Amino acid sequence: MASSTLELSGLNFNLTEEQQAVREAARDFARTELLPGVIERDNAAKFPTEQVRRMGELGFLGMMVSPDYGGGGMDTVSYVIAMEEISKVDASCSVIMSVNNSLVCWGLEEFGSEQQKQKYLTRLATGEVIGAFCLSEPEAGSDATSQHTTALDKGDHYLLNGTKNWITNGGSASVYLVIAQTDLEKKHRGINCLIVEKGQDGFAVGKKEDKMGIRASDTHSLMFTDVKVPKENRIGDDGFGFKFAMSTLNGGRIGIAAQALGIAAGAYERALTYSQERQAFGKKIFDHQAIQFKLAEMATKIEAARLLVYKAARLKDEHNDFVQAAAMAKLFASEVAMWATTEAVQIHGGYGYVKEYHVERFMRDAKITQIYEGTSEIQKLVIARELVK
Ligand code: CAA
């Protein structure tokens, strides 16, 4: 088993002073700048332009990127701490942050050329522009090797054609990492990842999805018709694109696990507070064992999710194999998020079903964490494969 032993990471979860400072900064930012207007942005499905600008200013959009490229030079543990705190308040903002940090910036820094890093990463890490990761297609979600988008080799450039679906930051991004098939015969080893810029001839942003949750983030389909992409915009060697996508998603899953953890914790904190204010049958509802048991179980499962998320982050920071740990963290944290947010609505009763109390939004936002960056079923597949490796 590659990474399943608990002792591997030493289980030392004492936070450094820097990590504690990150938690305080993210918590403070979330409460003072994200909480006001979060319900309105969700209702109107309004992209949080000003909030994203501030996330860039505060260093939340390129946390793990080296300072040489304008990033914060922080570790993955600091990143999950910030993701958790921001997700406790606004999961739309945290998915924008997650995609930019772990799918776009991380992938570019790890595998991009020096020229690509100078040209794109420096602007992405500071939040001057944001990025999108374009893998999913109308007929390629979980089955990600079935790419229909093509990138035909035309000598000094690729000719890109096809459609991408459900792309987070689809309308707001300026830099797009697009996965496409160059050589069909080579199957997944004939796939490339190309950097495409908004505004290139033949590149059109399609309709914005009207979503159940994370409504303030913008999710679009993208259409590419004979888009000429220079060869220098290919990430890695010819045929590296699928490996690039999988390697990048391994780390991305830690970010989404942290998002799920934050959504669960945010709903739990609201339910705990409410249970100590609301009276029923002559006492606070917290004093009814039915409610106590719910909260006790929520606190326990959230803590277990936190341990898995921090463990995966720590393994990545220590350059250990973290594929299975990331899949376990995402699987468990997202299931906890869905369950805990439903319980938080239940504890709030009728108030939980209306928008003012926030928990119904948490419940809607939780659902996507079981779907994107690999469904719960795909995480189980990844975990099972690692068991017999
Ligand atoms: N890490 C590194 N490499 C991996 C990998 C991993 N976790 N999983 C597979 N690979 C490599 C394999 O080693 C293999 O390469 P080689 O043949 O060169 O050795 C190659 O990828 C193909 O692997 P498989 O034969 O295992 O392929 P498969 O088709 O049986 O399974 C899969 C692949 C794991 C199911 C994959 O398709 C998958 O992860 N699907 C889910 C896709 C996904 O997560 N999409 C998310 C979209 S992005 C998003 O959601 C962002 C957002 O909006 C927030």
Image: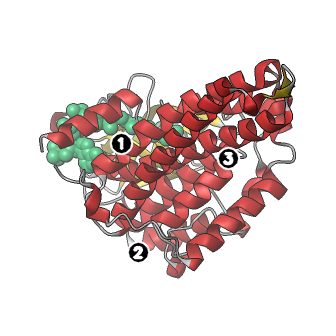
User: Which residue in the structure is indicated by mark 2?
Assistant: 114
The answer to which of marks 1 and 3 sits earlier in the sequence is 3
Quadrant of res 294: top right
Q: Is 143 above or below relative to 116?
A: above
Specify few, some or many for label 1: CA neighbours under 10 Å numbering under 14, 14-19, or 20 or more. Answer: many
Q: Is 9 above or below relative to 35?
A: below
Quadrant containing the C terminus is top left
The answer to which of marks 2 and 1 sits earlier in the sequence is 2
Q: Secondary structure at mark 3?
A: loop
User: Which residue in the structure is indicated by mark 3?
Assistant: 88
Q: Amino acid at mark 2?
A: Glu
Distance of label 3 from label 2 (alpha carbons): 36 Å
The answer to which of marks 3 and 2 sits earlier in the sequence is 3
Q: Which mark is residue 328?
A: 1
Q: From this viewpoint, which residue is outermost toward the bottom? A: 68
Q: Is 144 above or below relative to 190?
A: above
Distance of label 2 from label 1 (alpha carbons): 34 Å
Q: Does residue 9 appear anywhere in the picture? A: yes
Q: Amino acid at mark 3?
A: Lys
Q: Nearer the viewer, mark 3 or mark 2?
A: 3
- State the image coordinates of residue 223 (x, y, percent, origin top left): 53, 33
**Residue beneath the point at 71% across and 45% down:** 90
Q: Nearer the viewer, mark 2 or mark 1?
A: 1
- State the image coordinates of residue 167 (x, y, percent, origin top left): 55, 37
Q: Secondary structure at mark 1?
A: helix
